[in-house]
Amino acid sequence: MLLSLPEKEKFAPDPSFKLDTFKRREIWGNLNPLVIEIGSGQGEQVEWAASRFKNLDFLALEVFPQGVAHSVRRLHSKGIENARILQADAFHFFLSNLLSNSVFEVWTFFPDPWPKTKHHKRRLISEDFAPLVASALVPGGHWRIATDDNDYALQIHEVLDAFPGLENMGNLPMELPLKHFGKGNRDLQASAPKGKFFQIERFEDRTLTSFEKKGMEAGRKIYDFDYMKI
Ligand SMILES: C[S@@+](CC[C@H](N)C(=O)[O-])C[C@H]1O[C@@H](n2cnc3c(N)ncnc32)[C@H](O)[C@@H]1O
């Protein structure tokens, strides 16, 4: 269940490791389509999906040690054999360890929102990360994303709608403030000019995690996105 790889530095597997077909067979015993979940948290989603879709292989990337430990126990106790947890930083893993056109789907559900303006640059879904995901996906592969942070939703649209290799599959119009706001000035969002964007229906294979539940209980709106590699 736990995938251990030699590391170059903390959470960065050695760049000489490539998840090629030889390694895929060694790790999963087959070459079924691969789904990578980024930031799998407590492992609720990977457990839910891997137990239902035996014809897919799953790799969950998570940096938080307790999340990794919890997820490994969870998969182990359910006897799930088609999923692996890797303690790795997704940016490094996509940069160095994946081959182009090798990943069926990428899931990023509730990436850390980094709400303070000075921390927005730490957000994972960025102009630097988008080309790495697009390269790893097979043509026609999907990058599915959810967030409960409307400022991050704006960032996702700004970055991914403008990225030439990805197509926004969304068909549900939504409005977002056209300007970024941080934790300190979010109350100004209501009066800011709005722009129209497109999101998508909730991904039917996304389970309700405790993280999402907390957001909903706090009254936050959930945004779902689906970007397809063209
Ligand atoms: C807000 S939590 C959401 C967890 C889970 N997806 C859910 O819906 O419950 C975000 C998770 O992403 C992980 N994370 C943040 N940056 C990451 C990165 N660069 N690579 C892998 N995991 C990351 C965090 O440790 C955290 O567990």
Image (cartoon, rainbow, N blue to C red):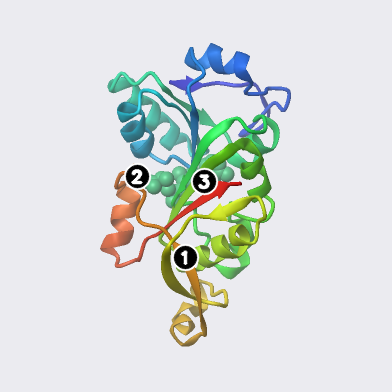
Q: Is residue 59 above or below residue 222?
A: above
Q: Is residue 71 visible in the rendered structure shown here?
A: yes
* Circle on res. 143: 3
Q: Distance between the residues labelled 1 and 3?
A: 15 Å
Q: Where is residue 76 in the image (x, y as percent from the top left)?
A: 34, 21
Q: Residue sitting at 43 percent across and 20 percent down?
A: 1
Q: Which of marks 2 and 1 is nearer the N terminus?
A: 1
Q: For numbered disc 2, what is the local secondary structure?
A: loop
Drawn side of residue 156 relative to residue 191, left or right: right
The residue that label 1 is drawn on is 198
- The quadrant where residue 214 appears: bottom left
> Is disc 2's CB within 8 Å of ligand 1?
no
Q: Is residue 74 visible in the rendered structure shown here?
A: no
**Disc 1 marks which amino acid?**
Phe
**Disc 2 marks which amino acid?**
Arg
The residue that label 2 is drawn on is 206
Q: Is residue 201 above or below residue 77?
A: below
Q: For numbered disc 1, what is the local secondary structure?
A: strand
Q: Residue sitting at 42 percent across and 41 percent down?
A: 41
Residue contact at pointers 3 and 2, CB within 8 angstroms: no
Q: Residue sitting at 60 percent across and 57 percent down?
A: 160
Q: In this view, does 171 lie above or below 83?
A: below
Q: Earlier in the sequence, mark 3 or mark 2?
A: 3
Task: Tell me if mark 1 has few (under 14), some (14-19) or many (20+) residues whose alpha carbon lies within 10 angstroms of its own.
Answer: some
